Image (cartoon, rainbow, N blue to C red):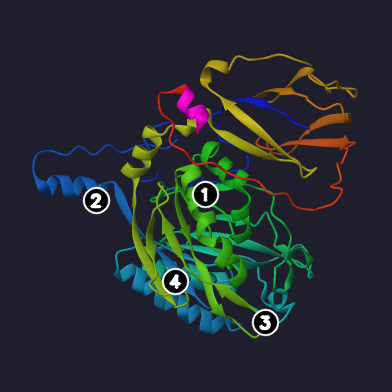
Amino acid sequence: MSFCFHLTRITLPLRTVRLSSTQPKPKHTLTTRSRLNSISVQSRAGDSESAMAAAANSVRVAVAQMTSINDLAANFATCSRLAKEAASAGAKLLCFPENFSYVGAKDGDSLKVAEPLDGPIMQQYCSLARESSIWLSLGGFQEKGTDDAHLSNTHVVIDDAGNIRSTYKKIHLFDVDVPGGRSYKESSFTEAGKNVVAVDSPFGRLGVTVCYDLRFPELYQQLRFLHEAQVLLVPSAFTKVTGEAHWEILLRARAIETQCYVIAASQAGKHNDKRESYGDSLIIDPWGKIVGRLPDRLSTGIAIADIDFSLIDSVRSKMPIAKIATWVLMLDSSLIFKACLLGDNNLGMKAGASSGIGSQLTSGSLHRYNFPRFSIRYQWSSRTIVNSQPTQTQSPAHIQFTVRTRVRVAMAAATNSVRVAVAQMTSINDIAANFAT
């Protein structure tokens, strides 16, 4: 079953973005398709002026690496020390890993320490930000849930005055049987978030995520192409097994495909007898280059790098993927549909039914359906569809379909594997020679 969705590009803010009406305008922005006020820096003759212009178009940030334990006071002492180090190094933002304030020794411990955001634990960190004059990214705070049996895995962004500027509740929960390791069931005690969150800051527009979200690129596509993120925050506590296999490559992929900086703070080392984290906190630029990293992936400390807004602008202008961007819609049927954003020349496309699509759809039939601020055209190429009824979700960024299908499965008769080959060659301007090769 294959689908092609063509959507018109939108520039209005989406309801899933949480912004404070009191927050200041960012000091640095992109000049292309940005909703934010821009600053232009003119450089005159002279090295000092050029250096000043370069400094005005960049800002220093830090990423932390630590080993949290089941001791709130000890973890706060570590965070306080790292915040002072970051501030002394000139960093204006410090990003802490998931579960920065607490890692339980056994199942259920996190529920016991969960608090609302106005509780004493988070207020300590607000005071730390204010006293250190530094913004803090606190990913994976145990926020009290809607009942005693659940909490929210909440990423909190605090400004240098100690005010909470944004919160994001982790959408993708870690329910995984780690190969060669233990089984995790985060959903058994954690409520999944529903909103995609971006927030304006002096460090550009921040896309806010947590750990396991990293494996779902559609979230980062939305942050980049719908919410215009410039810096992606990925506080994490990757396991040793999954970190060794996937940590760096996933982070670099998210940076490259979105042309954003990625700041990934990580837990590191053994927290207790049952839990060990991979470590290796990273800062990655929009070209996928690692620009900040601790020399030891298991040590406690910080890495420093500069967010260069002119580099973001340069990468995006030289490789303008936003003009033909492909992003992925998350659907309740767990099926993945690719959607192609059209350019502004297609803003007037309006066609198709104004209500349900209908039940019996034939292969190759073309249908269109109009949603608020979206015009969708899709091609059904499978005869297995027996019914499809679209419904609009709370956010126009998410279009939800309930799909019932009959699927033919071809079973392998004798084996569960097959050998394939990949070619590498140097083609030239000789068709016959290339064919011979």
Q: Along the horizontal axis of the image, is 373 left or right of 315?
A: right
Q: Earlier in the sequence, mark 2 or mark 1?
A: 2
| 156 horizontally vs 181: left or right | left
| Element type where label 4 sits in the image | helix
Residue position marked by numbered label 1 in the rendering: 254
Looking at the rendered image, the disc whose residue lies closer to the viewer, 4 or 2, is 2
- Which residue is label 4 attached to? 128
The Cα atoms of the two marked residues, 4 and 3, are separated by: 31 Å
- CA distance separating discs 2 and 1: 26 Å
Q: Mark 3 is on which residue type?
A: Lys
For marks 2 and 3, the one nearer the N-term is: 2
> Do the numbered discs 3 and 1 sit on residues whose CB atoms are within 8 Å?
no
Circle 4/circle 1 CB separation < 8 Å: no
The disc label shown at residue 55, or none: 2
Q: Distance between the residues labelled 4 and 2?
A: 26 Å
| Residue 274: image tag | 3
Between circles 2 and 3, the one closer to the viewer is 3
Determine contact: label 4, label 3, CB under 8 Å.
no
- For the record, the magenta segment spans 432-437
Q: Is residue 436 magenta?
A: yes
Give how far apart the Cα atoms at labels 3 and 1 are: 30 Å
What amino acid type is highlighted by mark number 4?
Answer: Leu
Secondary structure mostly seen in magenta is helix
Instruction: Looking at the image, tell me whether mark 4 or mark 3 is earlier in sequence order.
Output: 4
> How many marks are shown on the rendered structure?
4
Q: Earlier in the sequence, mark 4 or mark 2?
A: 2
